[in-house]
Amino acid sequence: MNNYHHGDLRAALLDAAGDILQEKGLEGFSLRECARRAGTSHAAPAHHFGDTPGLLSEFAALGFERMVALMRAARAAAGPDAWDQLRATGRAYIDFALANRAAFQLMFRTDRLDAGHARLRDASAAAFGELRSALAALHGGDVETPRLMLAWSAVHGFSTLLLEHATDGIRQETDVQRFSREMGDAVLALLKNSLAP
């Protein structure tokens, strides 16, 4: 059994959770397997996270935090044009989903997460806030909820279709990353008139 310091064990359990979710999906996840992979006792996950929803919620919160960082970096690199910033924010959302399938799918499984988990609640709100902020910048102020829902539905729905391989027949031999960029841009361009003020 590995000997971890307190902070390292917490990180090791989260890493193990990510590996299990990537390999087996949410239905194949267990705290016992998570502890085994982290090289610690079966009681360790409960000690650090309370229960399965507690550990999964912490993992989902980290996912949202990484998504926020990616969205902020993409927007900052997009230049001063508000539309370019919104498009970059949407691309970053899709890129995160493709690079972090297990985390992305878990992040929206409210039936398996702890609704009262403060870090998850804050991180989720921050991710939604990034999209709202980019759209508000395009409008020069606050934005109506229907436009916000349209933007979110577009990037989230497209991400989900890619992850579930629903677009495989359409993209055929095109690399999924290239397809996500080209088709994502095309979809956002079609939405520009609906999202713009």
Image (spheres, rainbow, N blue to C red):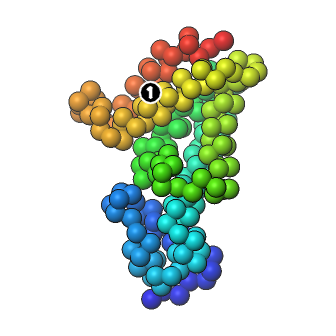
> In the picture shown, does residue 90 fall above or below 5?
above
- Image quarter for residue 83? top right
For badge 1, the amino acid type reads Gly
The location of residue 165, given as percent across then percent down, is: 29, 38
Tell me which residue sits at (56%, 26%) in the image: 149
* 11 horizontally vs 29: left or right: right
* 19 horizontally vs 113: left or right: left
Pick the front one: 127 or 87: 127
Tell me which residue sits at (51%, 72%) in the image: 13
The location of residue 156, given as percent across then percent down, is: 48, 34
Tell me which residue sits at (39%, 64%) in the image: 29
Tell me which residue sits at (56%, 83%) in the image: 4
Pick the front one: 111 or 177: 111
Pick the front one: 49 or 140: 49
Q: Which residue extends farthest right?
A: 141
The location of residue 82, given as percent across then percent down, is: 67, 22
Q: Which residue is denoted by mark 1 in the rendering?
A: 184
